[in-house]
Amino acid sequence: MMVSPTYLGIDLGTSELKALVLSQSGEVLASAGSPLTVSQPRALWSEQEPSSWTDALVKACRSLQVAHPQGYAAVQGIGLSGQMHGATLLNSKGHVLRPCILWNDTRSAQACAELKTACPDLEKITGNLAMPGFTAPKLAWVRRHEPEVFAQTSKVLLPKDYIRLQLTGEYVSDMSDAAGTLWLAVASRDWSDAMLTATGLTRHHMPRLVEGCAVSGYLTDQAAQLLSLKAGLPVAGGAGDNAASAIGLGAVRAGDGFISLGTSGVIFLTTAAFAPNPANAVHAFCHALPNTWHQMSVMLSAASCLKWVTDLTGSASEAELLKSAAQLTETERANCPLFMPYLSGERTPHNDADASGAFIGLRQSHHAAHLCYSVIEGVSFGLLDGLNALRKAGGTAQELQLVGGGARSTLWAQLLSNVLNVRIATYVVSSVGAALGAARLAQLAVEGSDPSSIARICTQHTVDKLYQPQDSERLALAARYARFAALYPILSATFKASTA
């Protein structure tokens, strides 16, 4: 029996590697995951052994082969997605020199200021602020603190690109992931010699660049045998995790966007041109498709704030606490305390690691339901801060898709629509969004990436619920947001004193 072509999507996360098999018509035939562990040998450090990524990939692919042997055998292309910003250092023989320094490693904070001094045009070139999460400051740290490792470094790869090396033998990265290194001139989609020089590197240390939907290499005989696939399969350029999620959600046209309401909170907007706003800690990166860019606002604590207040109040579950908050009257909501959602510091728009959480206006009459409402409202206000920062750079959106754990709450979805003044759409989307995007990029690499193919393959999902802004609620929320926005300038000095 003839089986239609299928595509393998691989997403290398921080805690898990996910993989799926996608049919030519866009149906997920099988998915699998393999857990990963993070090492934190010192305060502020976060590392992973690259060998664990390959092991996880083999395990996930074997699970796919068992779950859907026909679909797995019909794979015609492979796409990659992964956690961004990680620094994987290789010597001239392609051997790993040290554990990969991950995106959430913050040891290189001092190096960020030094990079700005070394390259005064940093923000103009990269469209972003220098932050410890990016890759370039990590190499500046290695150069100073591990000079023997730095001297041996021949290539620097992002995590998913190390997997590509194992699959194809090629040193390649894509535009969207490379934009998160601080070495890319994002507007021109090319490495910046000035930024490389600032960290003591040259283009020789960098992988070749391709678009996310282009072929980056072909599966070697050895890798094919390891994964039980056909040798010579094309491997697409792929994407960083957020850009891959956007491909999986069909957010590929200017104005398309989504909110990821997970542990952290992200607003992602697709743009037709490079649209930076580094002054407000907006990320401006290349998208996974040619001649397309995107903006992101990032808040460090989003749905994690809900988990925190659930544990704090001893509530049975987040769902039960949200249910009680949904029963509050309009007057009760108006009298809830304001919540500053900075439990892990904040990125957009304040870029303040010292910012901390706070309830303002607590009374003895307040109970768990009031605190729950305050928390989801405060996170929503933080996302509005981020959306306003995107708008200052020209970003626009009339509708945003809502994904992540917080998307399951109708109360929160409607609140976001009212606060942001945009339509909010929720979808029946699996948890393998970035892997789905990676598989779609593989399909584009094989079948072609002309506009009609992109429109056919990168479709949006069927809407489950659509939330419209409610004018009656928006006025009261606007007044509370004005009070919320006035609090950070007042409290910022207190935040810094508390940290000190």
Image (cartoon, helix red, strand yellow):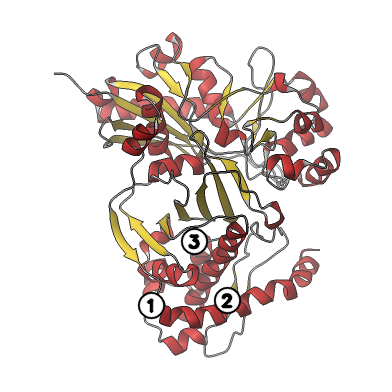
Counting from the top left corner in percent of width and height, residue 376 is at 49, 70
Residue type, label 1: Ala
Counting from the top left corner in percent of width and height, residue 124 is at 73, 43
Contact between marks 3 and 1 (CB within 8 A): the answer is: no
Q: Residue beneath label 3, please?
A: 303
116 horizontally vs 61: left or right: right
Q: Residue beneath label 1, please?
A: 326
Count of labels shown? 3
Q: CA distance from mark 3 to mark 2?
A: 19 Å
| Residue at 41 percent of width and 31 percent of height | 441
Q: Residue beneath label 2, please?
A: 481
User: Sequence-wise, which precedes: disc 3 or disc 1?
Assistant: 3
Quadrant (top left/top right/bottom left/bottom right) for the C terminus = bottom right
Considering the numbered disc 2 on the image, is that residue within a helix, a strand or a loop?
helix
| Residue 28 position by quadrant | top left
User: Sequence-wise, which precedes: disc 1 or disc 2?
Assistant: 1
Considering the numbered disc 1 on the image, is that residue within a helix, a strand or a loop?
helix
| Residue at 39 percent of width and 70 percent of height | 414
